[in-house]
Image: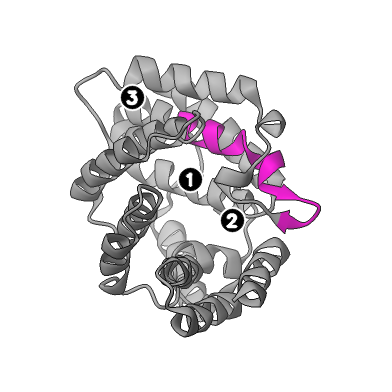
Amino acid sequence: MRTLGGLATDEIARCFLVSTETMKRRLTRARMKIETAGIPFRVPPGHLLPERLAAVLKVIYLIFNEGYGGRADLASEAIRLARVLTGLMPDEPEAFGLLALMLCHDARRSARVVDGHLVLLEDQDHTLWNSGQIAEGRSIVDRTLTGRHRGPYLIQAAIAALQTEQPVDWPQIVALYDELTSLTRSPIVELNRAVALAQASLPEAALTIVERLDLTNYQYFHSTRGELLRRLGRTEEARTAYRQALELAHSDPERRFLQRRLAAL
């Protein structure tokens, strides 16, 4: 993430939901391990690629996520790296799944932040979406999802592709998140599943999921919880949750969005 993506220590720490000091220690140990073992910096031979794939996919996606939060150069670099990876491993569905996932999300970049303000999916101007990227992402999903192997990146790509359709089929997205949850057991996936449930008109069920998650240092946990509480008319609790999200926000558009939510309450 540092060498290929140019991320600073605090940015890497935010990706892994740990403190900057914790990440500094991890990076130091990693450098020492690489130096001691004499691990070369090069593309490994073909027979070693599969065992390293999961780590490479995760790093590329984390680079993209940091870029999606505001640094367009990082998002573009992550997509470029994914294309390199699909060239190295043309029979790997997860590599194509990651590429499709990033293409579908990045296609909405121009509509996501307008004049410095964050715009939610349902309010975005679709004429600002990159139709070429969406078409490529959907095409990858259509031809890859039919295979027997449905890994987490491919499922997320299917979700992202559905989010570019009108109307959005939220019950189908919930079903895909159910499948993704069983694969990953990730609290972040559970949080996103709760968002999908709320969009499918089930805010109480969504809040039940959110309340049992241990993500108190994660900005989007608090903003999601605030939104659900707002929809359920629990105004004071919603204010508190939005304030907690605001304390953790690291981009100006997200801060402005949360401030607007608080002002509206």
Does the residue at mark 3 contact the one at mark 1 (Cβ under 8 Å)? Answer: no
Which sits earlier in the primary sequence, circle 2 or circle 1? 2
Q: Residue at x 24, y 18 (%)?
A: 147
Residue 10 is left or right of residue 201, and the answer is: right
Judging by the rendered image, the residue that carries numbered circle 2 is 2
Start-end of magenta stretch:
99-117
Main SS, magenta region, reads helix
Residue 135 position (above or below residue 9): above
Q: Which mark is residue 92?
A: 3
Which sits earlier in the primary sequence, circle 3 or circle 1? 1
Task: State the CA–CA distance, disc 3 to disc 1.
Answer: 16 Å
**Residue 3 x %, y %:** 60, 51
Q: Which mark is residue 61?
A: 1
- Image-quadrant location for residue 213: bottom left
Count of marks overlaid on the render: 3
Q: Quadrant of the C terminus?
A: bottom right
Q: Residue at x 46, y 59 (%)?
A: 35
Q: Is residue 110 magenta?
A: yes
